Image (cartoon, grey):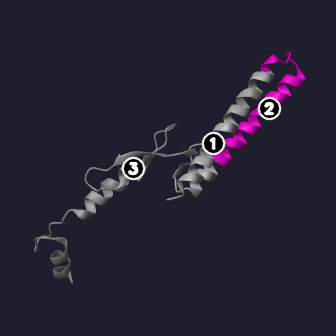
Amino acid sequence: MADESLITQITEYVRAGRETIGLFRAAASLLPKGDKRDKAELEIAAAERSLKLSEAVAARSLGYKLCQCEFPPNIMLSAGYHPRHDKEIYKCPKCDNQVPTKAYFEKRDKFSAPIKAESGSDWVSGRRRRR
């Protein structure tokens, strides 16, 4: 994985960016309603979107999974390991999408279980007899 100091630096960068945007948002709310305030709010929204995109790029470079439910993408977080397959599961905090999907585990269960053939006890011997 990435160096601890790099992760700390990226975390600090994101935190500082969010605080700065919060300050801009507070300052924009002090402006009287009108064109200047509307323009300031649009600029702040664009800055928030850019910060979220740079956060996603940094997360991807650190090996995190990204969910494509919206743009900029959301960072998927670990939800633990699958009990039978010992594979880590990642979930999107916004839409609850999961990687690997439940269908992946169902398919894996289906193909990892021995297939009983008419003439054999497992799929290998059943395959050999069909030839």
* Residue holding disc 3: 89
* Residue holding disc 2: 42
Disc nearest the viewer among 1 and 2: 1
25 part of magenta stretch: no
Q: Earlier in the sequence, mark 1 or mark 3?
A: 1
Q: Quadrant of the C terminus?
A: bottom left
Q: What percent of the width, then of the height, locates residue 100?
A: 41, 53
Residue 110, image quadrant: bottom left
Using a 10 Å C-alpha cutoff, classify the residue at mark 1 as few (fewer than 14 neighbours), some (14 to 19) or many (20 or more).
few
22 relative to 7 in the view: left or right: right
- Residue at the front extreme of this rendering: 5
Extent of the magenta region: 29-55
Q: What percent of the width, then of the height, locates residue 25?
A: 75, 26
Secondary structure at numbered mark 2: helix
The amino acid pointed to by label 1 is Glu
- Residue at the right extreme of this rendering: 35
104 relative to 116 in the view: left or right: right
| Residue 77, above or below 20 | below
| Residue 89, above or below 42 | below
Secondary structure at numbered mark 1: helix
100 relative to 25 in the view: left or right: left
The amino acid pointed to by label 2 is Leu
Q: Earlier in the sequence, mark 1 or mark 2?
A: 1
Are the residues flagged by discs 1 and 3 in contact, CB closer than 8 Å? no
Q: Earlier in the sequence, mark 2 or mark 3?
A: 2
From the viewer's side, name the closer residue of 16 and 25: 16
Q: What percent of the width, then of the height, locates residue 48?
A: 71, 37
